[in-house]
Image (tube, helix red, strand yellow):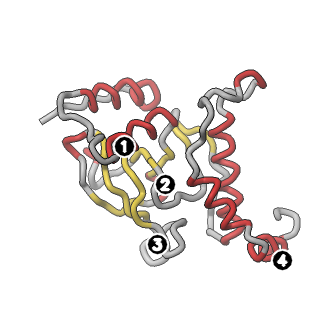
Amino acid sequence: FSTGGTEAARLLTDAGAVSALLVALRRIPDCDPACGAPFGMEDALEQLQVAARHTLAGLVGLPNAEAGGWSEGVLKVAVFIEGDCVVITGLEAKPELNRCGAVVIKATGEGYGPDPESGRYGVRVELPSQRRGTCIKVKPANLRLAPHDLSARILKAIAPGGGASSSGSDAAYLSSTINSKFGKLNVTMQ
């Protein structure tokens, strides 16, 4: 649609492209995260996420949507959808929530894109456990799509009966997953 402009975007939207992309983005891949490695694409699933989300942003006319890509070891994407596992970054007002694993719980009425009035997404912190349940509105620039292994850990934490323990395993996991990507992270359990 990049060469066809708004008419191409309208035709694709009318043909169900937005719905199809949302179904694909919400589906949990049933392959190994490194399934693209034999083809020289170790991050194939991540590249597909970036491309699909950039396409979705273009189709629905989200302003200023960057194509995205890897940023400090996590995915910077053009649009988030409800249920996405994310990492919070760059907050100045609540720096204690930086590097926390969270879930997008509020987007537009369609389930994707930031709230049109505030320009933010509602997120609920899930990891580490001492921050679990904290809900805030966050600018898209302060969210990154969680890598596959961290997403799996967040989904496990929110599954019925699968809540993460407060034994320190959350802190250790977050530290080992994110430290090399963001630098030193010290998480203490209360």
Which residue is labeled 1 in the image? 101
In which quarter of the view is residue 34 placed? Answer: top right
Q: Amino acid at mark 1?
A: Gly
Q: Residue at x 57, y 59 (%)?
A: 79
Which residue is labeled 2 in the image? 141
N-terminal of the pair, mark 4 or mark 2, is 4
The answer to whether the residues at label 1 and label 3 have Cβ atoms under 8 Å apart is no
Q: CA distance from mark 2 to mark 1?
A: 15 Å
Which residue is labeled 4 in the image? 7
Rendering coords of residue 119 (x, y %): 47, 69
Q: Secondary structure at mark 4?
A: helix
87 relative to 173, above or below: below
Q: Nearer the viewer, mark 2 or mark 1?
A: 1
Which residue is labeled 3 in the image? 115
Characterize the local packing of mark 3: few (<14), some (14-19) or many (20 or more) Cα atoms within 10 angstroms: some
Rendering coords of residue 50 (x, y %): 65, 47
Q: CA distance from mark 1 to mark 3?
A: 21 Å
